């Protein structure tokens, strides 16, 4: 079994707002900023952030 293969069990998780501290998440364009989100999850994210991503 590969790591994160059970991602469907964690579909309720959301990316932690702490890793996107300087952005207003109420108006955050997740599609436009997807590269930033991926980079932040790689740099600062927890296992839950990886599942959320």
Image (cartoon, helix red, strand yellow):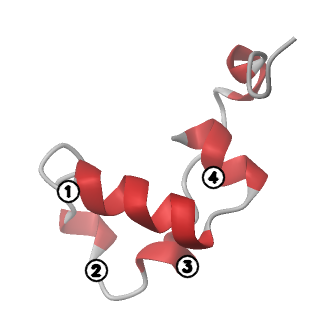
Report x, y in % for residue 25.
31, 68
Camera-side mark, 1 or 2: 1
- Residue ID at (76%, 51%): 47
* Left or right for 49, reference 5: left
Name the residue that disc number 2 marks: 23
Q: Is residue 44 left or right of residue 4?
A: left
Residue 49's tag is 4
Label 2 secondary element: loop
Q: Earlier in the sequence, mark 4 or mark 2?
A: 2
Q: Are marks 3 and 4 in contact (CB under 8 Å)?
A: no
Q: Nearer the viewer, mark 3 or mark 1?
A: 1
Element marked by disc 3 = helix
- Element type at marker 4? helix
N-terminal label among 1 and 2 = 2
Residue assigned mark 1: 33
Tag of residue 18: 3
């Amino acid at each position: 079994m590969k790591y994160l293969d059970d991602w469907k069990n964690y579909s309720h998780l959301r990316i932690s707002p702490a890793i996107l501290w300087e952005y207003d998440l109420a108006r955050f364009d997740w599609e436009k900023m997807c590269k930033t989100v991926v980079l932040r999850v790689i740099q600062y994210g927890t296992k839950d952030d990886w599942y959320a991503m």
